[in-house]
Amino acid sequence: MEVVIVPDAAAGGEVIAEAVAALLRRKPDALLGVATGSTPLPVYRALAGKVRAGTVDTSRTRVCQLDEYVGLPAGHPESYRSVLLREVVEPLGLSPDRFMGPDGAAADVAAACAEYDAALAAAGRVDLQLLGIGTDGHIGFNEPCSSLASRTRIKTLTEQTREDNARFFDGDITQVPHHVITQGIGTILEARHLVLLATGEGKAEAVAATVEGPVAAVVPASALQLHPHATVVVDEAAAAKLKLAPYFRATYAAKPDWQGL
Ligand SMILES: N[C@@H]1[C@@H](O)[C@H](O)[C@@H](COP(=O)(O)O)O[C@@H]1O
């Protein structure tokens, strides 16, 4: 696992956007796994800037969702599909027919999960999966004690996650669904490159457990330790509890530019 400590969220967005741009220059039809939440927004902003400047071509890029709420009516502004259409597909100039995600409004949720898992495999696997992290260490919506081998399936949110996400629902926790569909941890680990971005002091504990703690289902993000190409980008605040921070800084400072993330 590589840990990159950047001064702030904007710098994190820039570093990751450059890695995505490098991937798209190598493989224009790459499948990009995108995440929701506030954390990845600087990445999308930086990427949109590159698209506008003409330094990256997204005309063939495919994108896929990490997770979705269950039971929100189709087109609800806070469904992750709507959020990603608004924050990623539109600003990056992508075609909506190159965007795939699970159907959170399906009558048969189990079938929708299995279909989505199969669709990701049929698409040739995700090339780069962008991840945020929950304050409890979740990735996607894999809450603590999710199986590290799990596939796309329905999960129940913890009270903590519903409280954290209430800000997207006018601060009203009763509007936050209890159930979600999420790519499983086993599914996420099939992506070729995992890039987790964490910013702010509220994530410092989860980051330390992810990077320096044991691999344990109670900290779902610690599964990144099992992946051959996992990158964790953190700002100073989120890095505050990393004992190996001096080593991570020195390693990144000495890294040749051509290597990328
Ligand atoms: N399902 C999403 C996660 O993918 C995201 O990482 C997490 C953190 O969100 P934020 O980046 O807003 O802190 O929120 C939600 O639970």
Image (spheres, rainbow, N blue to C red):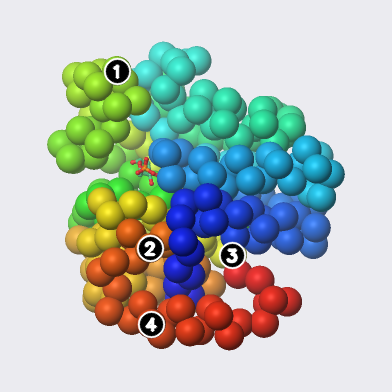
User: Which residue is the extreme one toward the left?
Assistant: 159
Kind of residue at disc 2: Glu
Q: In this view, does 244 lie to the left or right of 7?
A: left
Q: Do the residues labelled 1 and 3 touch (CB within 8 Å)?
A: no
N-terminal of the pair, mark 3 or mark 2, is 3
Residue at image mark 3 = 192
Kind of residue at disc 3: Arg
Q: Where is residue 172 in the image (x, y as percent from the top left)?
A: 22, 19
In this rendering, is residue 175 above or below 181? Answer: above
**Mark 3 and mark 2: span between their CA atoms?**
27 Å
Q: Can residue 92 be seen in this view?
A: yes
**Mark 1 and mark 3: span between their CA atoms?**
37 Å
Residue at image mark 2 = 236
Say which element carries label 4.
helix
Say which residue appears at 31% left-offset and 20% top-offset.
169
Say which residue appears at 71% left-offset and 41% top-offset.
49
Q: Where is residue 166 in the image (x, y as percent from the top left)?
A: 26, 27
N-terminal of the pair, mark 3 or mark 4, is 3
